[in-house]
Amino acid sequence: MSYIAHLKIVLIGDGGVGKTSIAHRYLRKGFNYEYKQTIGVDVYSKRSIINIKNYKINISWVIWDLAGQPKFREVRKEFYRGAKGAILVFDISRRETFDNILHWANEFLHNSGRYPVVLVGNKVDLRDKVSDPVSPEEGEKLARTLSKIFSIKVPYIESSALLRINIDTIFDEIGMLILRKAFERRER
C-alpha cells in the first residue's frame, strides 16, 4: 500500500550551527561556505519515500528553517504552528550552542507540543580543530534527557553538512518517528 504524508518540521537551534546548510544538503543544493544569517524563516519543500510497517509512504516535506538569533524569538512563535516534529541542532565545536538546546526544546514544546524530535550535533568535521568539542557521549546523554522531557525516544545523530555526513539519516529518522507516532495513534 502507498500513502502520502504531508509533514511540516522545524529546524531549530542557535544561529550559525548549520541549520540552513543541513537543509540545503538534504535538498541537494550544495554547500555555501559563506555564513548568511536566516532572517525570520526560510521554507523548503521536498518529496521522499519512507517504508514503514509494510507501507510505502510518500512524504511531502515542508521544512521550516527558523532563525536562531534571540531577536527573532517573538516572530518564531507563529512559525511553529502545525509542526509535527523538530530537528534540534547544535555545533559540536561551540559548547554554548549545546548548552542552549534545552531552551530550544522548551520553546518547541511550548509552541508545538510533544512531537518527535531528533538531536543533531553538527560540524563533526571540526572536532579535531577545537580545544573543547562536545563529545558523542555528551550528545547521547542530552538525547536521553530530551527523551524524558518529550516522553518519546530522541535519537542523537552527529553530522557534517560540509562533508555531507548523515544528512539523509537526520530526515529519515525524524520522518520515521513522526510516522510511527501517527500509526500508533491510528491503531488505538
Image (cartoon, rainbow, N blue to C red):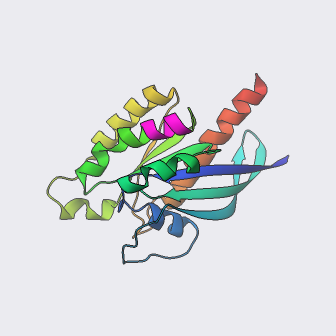
Answer with the quarter of the image where residue 127 lies. Answer: bottom left
Q: Position of residue 23 (x, y in %)?
A: 52, 64
Q: Residue furthest right?
A: 1
Question: Which of 112/71 is in front?
Answer: 71
**Rendered view: 59 above or below 155:** below
Q: Position of residue 105 (x, y in %)?
A: 43, 39
Q: Position of residue 121 (x, y in %)?
A: 36, 52
- Reply yes or no: does residue 6 show up in magenta: no
Furthest residue in direction top, as rendered: 188
- Of 164 and 47, the residue lying toward us: 47
From this view, report whether residue 16 is shown above or below residue 9.
below
Q: Which residues are magenta?
A: 106-111
Quadrant housing residue 83: top right
Q: Principal SS element in the magenta part?
A: helix
9 to the left or right of 133: right
Which part of the image, by quadrant, shows the C terminus?
top right
Q: Residue at x 38, y 55 (%)?
A: 71
Front position in the image: 166 or 119:
119
Image point 56% across, 33% down: which residue? 113
Which residue is pictured at 40% across the width and 68% down the height? 37
Count up the numbered dots: 0
Residue 15 place in picture, x, y as percent: 36, 59
In the rendered image, the residue lying farthest to the left is 131
Report whether 14 appears left or right of 53. Answer: left
